[in-house]
Image (cartoon, rainbow, N blue to C red):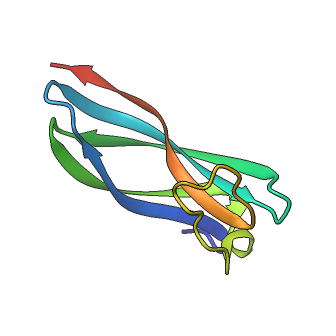
Amino acid sequence: MEPGVAGWEGILENKMPDFVTTWVQISVSIYDPGGVEQEYFAETSIWIDPQDEAEFRMKIPALKREQIEGIEFCENDNPAPKACMEWGVKRILGLSI
């Protein structure tokens, strides 16, 4: 990763029995103490066979490491997150087989 640029990595799972995942877009949302959201996006090519999983790693050029240092992840069921961050898959592209 480039110095100062935030990176994101993990494992993505393809639960579909007849679909190959070939591209994903993720979002990282940071909520300030007042609950105002700032959303950042990253995308990558990836190959995930049906009902399989794959590791991913990508950089988020617009997001700096210092922006997420010390910030906890939001609680899953919090309808009004504040002073936390969360991430998720926004878009998935692939092939039906």
Q: Taking 21 as reference, is 27 above or below it?
A: below
Left or right: residue 32 versus residue 53 is right
Residue under the point 58% across and 57% down: 86
Where does the image place residue 44, in percent across and percent down from the top left? 45, 44
Where does the image place residue 97, in percent across and percent down from the top left? 14, 19
Where does the image place residue 37, in percent across and percent down from the top left? 76, 50
Q: Which residue is the extreme one toward the right?
A: 34
Residue 59 found in image quarter: bottom right
Residue under the point 54% across and 54% down: 77
Instruction: From the viewer's side, name the closer residue of 78 and 64.
Output: 78
Instruction: From the viewer's side, name the closer residue of 89 and 31.
Output: 31
Left or right: residue 44 versus residue 71 is left
Q: Which residue is the extreme one toward the bottom?
A: 70
Residue 30 found in image quarter: bottom right
Left or right: residue 61 versus residue 17 is right
Residue under the point 54% across and 68% down: 1
Where does the image place residue 95, in percent across and percent down from the top left? 26, 22
Residue under the point 82% across and 52% down: 36
